Image (cartoon, rainbow, N blue to C red):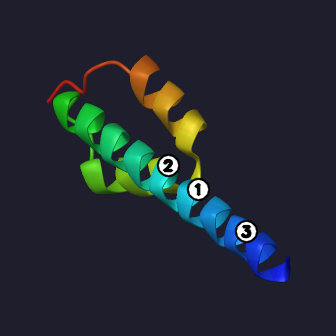
Amino acid sequence: MLLAADGAVVFGYLFGLVVAIIFAAICSRIATGKGRGPILWAVLGFIFPLLALIVILILPRKVH
């Protein structure tokens, strides 16, 4: 029984990691399209997934 519980915990961590990586990739791609720093937005998307996505969607294109 303990093994099953540990497996569920590991699955939860892996699921969270995969979701964070997906959000990081999405934020990075959107940031690139808006002329913003993709690495910064990938990191923000990894640490604050939903918040970073909302912010990068709201931000206007960067004018050079």
Element assignment for label 2: helix
Disc number placed over residue 62 in the picture, else none: none
User: What amino acid is labelled 1 in the image?
Assistant: Gly
Residue to which mark 2 is pinned = 19
Image location of residue 47, percent across then percent down:
56, 56
Image location of residue 36, percent across then percent down:
26, 39
Cα distance between the residues tagged 2 and 3: 15 Å
- Judge depth for marks 2 and 3 and give the one in front: 3
Instruction: Determine whether label 1 and label 2 are within 8 Å by CB.
Output: yes
56 left or right, relative to 35: right
Residue to which mark 3 is pinned = 9
Residue to which mark 1 is pinned = 16
- The residue lying toward the viewer, choosing from 9 and 58, is 9
> At x 33% / y 38%, what residue is drawn?
26
Using the rendered image of the protein, determine whether residue 22 is visible from the camera's viewpoint. yes
- The residue lying toward the viewer, choosing from 48 and 58, is 48
- In the picture, which quadrant includes the C terminus? top left
Element assignment for label 1: helix
Image location of residue 62, percent across then percent down:
24, 27
User: What amino acid is labelled 3 in the image?
Assistant: Val
Cα distance between the residues tagged 1 and 2: 5 Å
Instruction: Determine whether label 3 and label 1 are within 8 Å by CB.
Output: no
Q: Seen from this angle, which residue lies furthest left?
A: 64
Image location of residue 31, percent across then percent down:
28, 36
